[in-house]
């Protein structure tokens, strides 16, 4: 699945005969569908208006293989007993994480924060999973909700360890910029860029930070900066990076925006060799045809 979030470069749209790219509000994959209703409000289980966490959990469990259903039923039963709640919550959170149900994992890590307030890893796991859950939402309200939940948990991680957890710094940098866009940020939005730049200074090849810096450069019209970021990313090679084909796609967009048509065509031709979906290849061909 492609890298995440509220700022994401979408596919193509034709405007007065000229093919242009747009940014979509969503989160990760440009081909993903946003079809999961996830959420939870706090340790006290204050539900989001119009959202019922218990119903969501029951619905997700009903769609799992029977083996997983049975395991989770046992785990949930243990939460009602007198055993070690810390361990029971952790096991359930990890189970949902293994099943790629990020919202549910975040929910139970969030509960564990209240029992282990000095455990940095618990705060990080809650923030990371809520961050990942942002790609699963189907409304702006739910998106804002998960941004806030991730932001709160990762703020605690960075407070405990300001410089070492580069993933927390990267995700929080994006959270800050997104909160600025949805007008829920109390501080300056440049803190977000600052965190991403700090990550790149510590690890010049950090793909996640470079990707988001490139995307934010695109959104703010700084296409030369975007070209620099995405050229750097393409130079790193695939190395198991599921986002790798899309770096060429974004690079092509930035080239188009700066009038570099031949470079855009070359990037799109490379992109076509890296993606498997015929629809993506056909759309790339349409763009190439429109700019030649």
Image: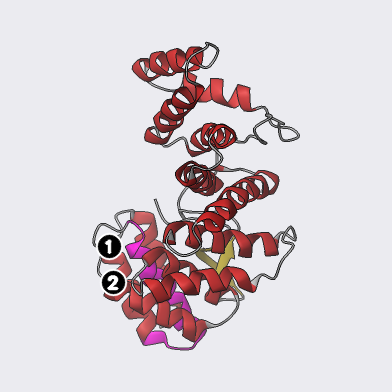
Residue 270 circle label: 2
- Choose between 52 and 138: the one closer to the eye: 52
Look at the image and give the residue range highlighted in magenta: 242-262
Q: Identify the coloring.
A: secondary structure
Give residue 121's quadrant in the image. top left
- Looking at the rendered structure, the secondary structure element under dot 2 is helix
In this view, 266 is above or below 209: below
Kindly indicate whether the residue at mark 2 contacts the one at mark 1 (C-beta within 8 angstroms): yes
Please name the predominant secondary structure of the magenta segment in the image. Answer: helix
* x then y, percent, for residue 150: 58, 49
- Residue 214 in view in this figure: no
In this view, 194 is above or below 154: below
Task: Give the position of the C terminus as an image quadrant.
Answer: bottom left
Residue shown at the point (43%, 58%) measured from the top left: 165
State the separation of the CA atoms marked 1 and 2. 7 Å
* x then y, percent, for residue 231: 35, 79
- Residue 280 in view in this figure: yes
* x then y, percent, for residue 171: 51, 58
- Choose between 62 and 22: the one closer to the eye: 62
Task: Estimate how packed mark 1 is, as few (under 14), some (14 to 19) or many (20 or more) residues with alpha carbons within 10 Å.
Answer: some
Give residue 24's quadrant in the image. bottom right
In this view, 259 is above or below 236: below
- Looking at the rendered structure, the secondary structure element under dot 1 is helix
Q: Is residue 61 magenta?
A: no
Residue 52 circle label: none
Q: Which residue is mark 1?
A: 274
Q: Is residue 254 magenta?
A: yes
């Amino acid at each position: 699945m492609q890298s995440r979030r509220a700022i994401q470069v979408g596919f193509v749209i034709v405007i007065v005969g000229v093919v242009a790219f747009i940014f979509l509000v969503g989160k990760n994959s440009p081909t993903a569908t946003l079809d999961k209703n996830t959420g939870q409000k706090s340790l006290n289980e204050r539900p989001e208006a119009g959202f019922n966490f218990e119903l969501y959990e029951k619905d997700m469990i009903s769609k799992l293989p029977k083996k997983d259903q049975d395991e989770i039923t046992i785990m949930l039963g243990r939460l009602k007993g007198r055993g070690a709640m810390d361990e029971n919550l952790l096991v359930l959170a990890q189970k949902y994480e293994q099943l790629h149900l990020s919202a549910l994992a975040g929910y139970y890590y969030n509960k564990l924060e209240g029992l282990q307030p000095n455990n940095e890893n618990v705060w990080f796991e809650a923030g990371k999973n809520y961050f990942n859950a942002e790609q699963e939402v189907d409304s702006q309200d739910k998106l804002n909700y998960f941004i806030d939940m991730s932001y709160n948990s990762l703020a605690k991680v960075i407070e405990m360890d300001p410089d070492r957890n580069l993933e927390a710094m990267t995700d929080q940098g994006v959270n800050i910029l997104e909160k600025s866009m949805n007008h829920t940020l109390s501080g300056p939005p440049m803190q977000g860029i600052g965190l991403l730049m700090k990550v790149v200074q510590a690890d010049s090849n950090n793909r996640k930070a470079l990707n988001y810096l490139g995307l934010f450069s695109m959104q703010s019209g700084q296409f030369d900066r975007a070209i620099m970021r995405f050229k750097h990313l393409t130079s790193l090679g695939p190395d198991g990076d599921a986002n790798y084909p899309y770096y060429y796609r974004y690079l092509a967009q930035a080239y188009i925006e700066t009038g570099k048509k031949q470079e855009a065509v070359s990037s799109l031709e490379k992109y076509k060799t890296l993606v498997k979906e015929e629809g993506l290849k056909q759309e790339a061909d349409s763009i190439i045809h429109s700019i030649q």
